[in-house]
Image (spheres, rainbow, N blue to C red):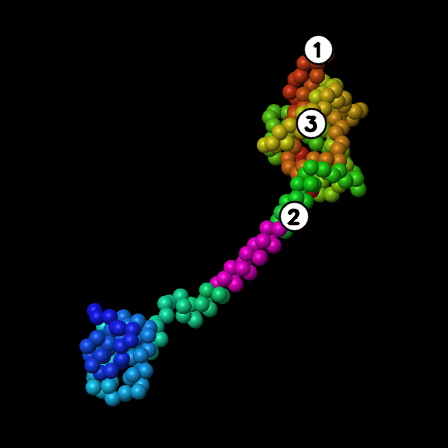
Amino acid sequence: MPTIPPTATMDRDFIARNQIVERYLAGKLPLKGAQDFERYCRENPELLDELRLTDQVHAGLRLLDASGLALPWEQKPRRFWEKLPVFIGVAVLALALAVLAAVVATRLSARNAQIGSLQDAVATQPLHPAVSTRSVTLLPSRTAPSRTNATVVGGEAQMADLRVDMSWSRYTAFRVTIDRVDQGRALVLYNLLRDSNGHLRIAFNTTALGPGSYQLAIEGLTLKGDLVPQAWVTVGVRR
């Protein structure tokens, strides 16, 4: 490709000899050469007709159209994520997710506060003063333990006065073991004596025990201190 002398004069012969048109269309002219060629075309517009430049431009546009490429003045097709409906949809979804996250965070905060309150209540196990007393006479089973509650106490802070009828037993002193059903041992009471009516008296504040079923196993004490199973009874406690 011939170079353009820095002092060359732009004319028709120079343009033809140095392939100025082809190099201009290909973008290979230096900046000064391109400016000189554009100035010459402004001063001599008939040159464009002589060079049939218009026909070349039209042929190039037809080639672009045939190839499916966008024409220079046409707006480049947007990708699907650049379209307005898609942008609005994404914005709405982001807003909905933000609202959902705020709601979940609020609920989690409330739940954590509730869990903390329950943990404090379990740790302190407050004992409420009894507002009433309930006396219940119980007839225990002499054959085997039962998971069925013979009575249910509680519902409010009250003193439950249990009177287990042991008038039929030949023993006068007893040990009472209290187990929470399916959980574990709660109390063991030694050397309980019957009253004049033959009852074993056990009284407690119902808020001292958690809600559930409590099984009482009653054993007689011999003179040697041996334990002999006598009876069983189950009591329910509610809050």
The residue under label 2 is 113
Near mark 2 (Cα within 10 A), the count class, few <14, some 14-19 or many ≥20, is few
Describe the element under mark 2 as helix, strand or loop.
Answer: helix
**Cα–Cα span, label 1 and label 2:** 56 Å
User: Disc 3 or disc 1, which is closer to the eye?
Assistant: 3
Q: Which residues are magenta?
A: 93-109
The N terminus, quarter of image: bottom left
In the displayed structure, would residue 134 be above or below residue 82? above
Residue drawn at (71%, 11%) of the image: 224
Quarter residue 11 falls in: bottom left
Q: Is residue 182 visible?
A: yes
Which amino acid, mark 1?
Answer: Lys
Describe the element under mark 1 as helix, strand or loop.
Answer: loop
Of 57 and 151, nearer the camera is 57
Of 234 and 86, nearer the camera is 86
User: Disc 3 or disc 2, which is closer to the eye?
Assistant: 2
The residue under label 3 is 187
